[in-house]
Amino acid sequence: MVQRPRVSQPSVKIPVALTIAGSDSGGGAGVQADLRTFAFHCVHGTSALTCITAQNTLSVTRVDALPPESVIAQIDAVVNDIGADAIKTGMLLNAEIMAVVAERLQSYHCDRLVVDPVMVSRTGVCLIDDEAIATLRDRLIPQATVLTPNRYEAQILAKQEIHTLDDMKAAAETIFKLGSQAVLIKGGGMRGKLCGVDVWFDGETLEVLRTETVGTHHTHGTGCTISAAMTANLALKQSPLEATKQAKIYLTQALHHALAIGEGQGPVGHYFPLLPSPKLSG
Ligand SMILES: Nc1ncnc2c1ncn2[C@@H]1O[C@H](COP(=O)(O)OP(=O)(O)OP(=O)(O)O)[C@@H](O)[C@H]1O
Ligand SMILES: Cc1ncc(CO)c(N)n1
């Protein structure tokens, strides 16, 4: 047997967050955005990949699903050893993967869970089929601490069109009935002054969350980033509403520092806390 030297090892206690989501080869959304966001909150990030997208700032050119058994094995490996103070789900892609993820989360009694119901891109393109939407609605959403649909996902879940702030509020109340503890309707897909205005409903509090509309074309990964920041804040033991408000502040700053990389929509700039601050003159 190898004897380990008896020296005291430095160690740091740090909250842990798990993301169950897809890979974005361009690094702006998906697992890459989630892990980077966790890191900038001083939360250790772990991951279970559901699919691999070939994607850049212009488009998604290919999606390969991982076998459901592989997704389960990744979740089990992480949770059984490292644990998770909070978990988020992102792009789950198909009904089979959704069903196994829902089953695993149920067996772990996860009580800090952010479900980003990735179904439709911000530009309105549908990413999953009807069976997957039904599985998401019936098996995953009722477990969520916070559910974070964008405008188009909220239209599907609430079965109504959303054009105005009142529409957003009504949809939040309808979607809340699907069983999550709270709903955040994200307004990045809203037009004009409503772009960047979100609506929160938790059964008691109906709140409009505003920062400012950031005039940038580089918005890739906004949805992944805000839900990952919420998850990190939940892992840091903030209340769901506080976690959401703080996450929106982080996301807005990241949008102010969005990256002009690639030919299309660049990603938000998660790195802003490390950027040198502007020099004081004088
Ligand atoms: N131009 C903007 N200015 C300010 N906030 C914005 C802007 N665009 C999006 N947001 C905010 O970003 C967050 C994510 O919202 P959005 O509707 O873009 O999500 P999504 O469609 O899921 O994102 P993704 O494009 O990553 O799929 C919300 O808080 C939203 O209000
Ligand atoms: C992998 C992945 N997840 C989520 C989104 C939504 O932004 C994306 N574009 N790619």
Image (cartoon, rainbow, N blue to C red):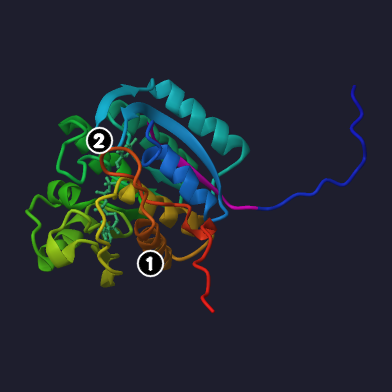
Mark closest to the chain's N terminus, 2 or 1: 2
Q: Toward the viewer: 246 or 136?
A: 246
> Which of the 4 image quarters holds residue 193?
bottom left
Could you tell me residue 190's position as x and y percent?
A: 15, 58
Q: Toward the viewer: 174 or 42?
A: 42
Q: Is residue 26 magenta?
A: no
Q: Specify the quadrant that holds the N terminus.
A: top right
- Residues shaded magenta: 14-24
Ligand 1 resides in the quarter of the picture at bottom left
Q: Toward the viewer: 250 or 201?
A: 250
- Residue on which the image places disc 2: 58
- Horizontal side, residue 39 vs residue 221: left or right: right
Q: Which mark is residue 206?
A: none
How many angstroms separate mark 2 from mark 1 (CA)? 30 Å
Q: Main secondary structure of the magenta part?
A: strand
The residue under the point 44% across, 52% down is 270
Which of discs 2 and 1 lies nearer the camera? The answer is 2
Could you tell me residue 262's position as x and y percent?
A: 32, 38
User: Callout 2: helix, strand or loop?
Assistant: loop
- Residue on which the image places disc 1: 245
**Please, what is the three-letter code of the amino acid marked with disc 1?**
Lys
Q: How many marks?
A: 2
- Horizontal side, residue 173 vs residue 115: left or right: left
Q: Is residue 22 magenta?
A: yes
